Image (spheres, helix red, strand yellow):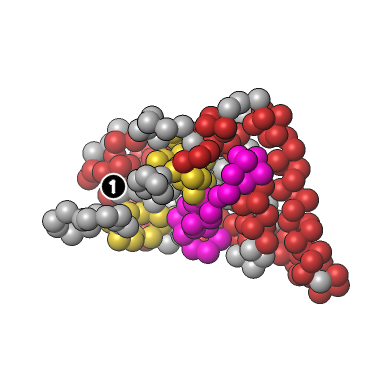
Amino acid sequence: MESVPTPIVSTVSASPSAGDASDVHVGTRNRVARSILANGPSTAVDLGKRLKMTPAGVRRHLDALLAEDLVEARQQRTYGQRGRGRPAKVFALTDRGRGVFYQAYDQLAVDALKFLADSAGSAAVEAFARKRVAELADRFRERMDSVPAEERPALLAKLLTEDGYAAGLRQSGNAPAAGEQLCQHHCPVAHVAEQFPQLCEAETEAFAELLGTHVQRLATIAHGDGVCTTFIPMTATATGTGKSTEVSGGNAL
């Protein structure tokens, strides 16, 4: 299985005589961008730990990515009581940054769905979205049905990752509202889903069917969030593990 494709980062600021040194900088810059894609919005400290780089080294490459409008800086979201001090900045891919990873013909897909909506109505678009996701669910169903309910969220994250969605799990909330969040750090149809949210809705319905429980979509890349996030209640998750499961990589559809 191929890994998530490497973005082609512009080298217009590099000197033609820089030679191999310039190639090394561009390669490292791509690693930084790939890490953000696979793990979602990240702080410079997080990136440094994952890539085994110094914070100063990471920030140098982040500055270059910011200058090329491939990433943007945001205030880190905090849940519950926040400690003292200014919240850390997180860095997320911009639409342009995500675009260098997408291999699908987004505009062609948008035009085709617009034609379908105009000629056959919105119900036809919904039927298409459900059919597309049903094909994915059919491939997952046998393996999902073969494990206990509490193991299905982790397995779903693994299967989605194998299909290119760079998915993972993290615990969320406290009893009685405890559960896990299924986080998809990559969406190969995000640009299309911006105009046709039926794709996201059908996907959420498929997740509920595969997991055998109601789920709630909290955020989507298509709506400008850094990660597609789906809440899975505790009834469908393992209890008492206290761990998150991150499975990144995979080839985009």
Q: Is residue 124 above or below residue 207?
A: below
* Residue 65 in sight: no
Judge whether 242 appears above or below 178 on screen: above
Task: Look at mark 1 in the image and give the residue it sits on.
Answer: 44
Of the pair 178 and 11, the residue shown nearer to us: 178
Q: Is residue 164 left or right of residue 133?
A: left
Which quadrant of the rendered structure holds the N terminus? Answer: top right
**Location of residue 217 in the rendering, given as x and y in whole percent from the top left corner:** 53, 55
Q: Residue at x 64, y 63 (%)?
A: 197
Q: Extreme left residue here? A: 84
Q: Residue at x 57, y 32 (%)?
A: 149
Q: Label 1 is placed on what type of residue?
A: Ala
Give residue 83's quadrant in the image: bottom left
Question: Which residue is located at x 14 percent, y 57 percent?
Answer: 85
Q: Which residues are magenta?
A: 207-230
| Image quadrant in which the C terminus is located | top right
Q: Residue at x 44, y 43 (%)?
A: 179
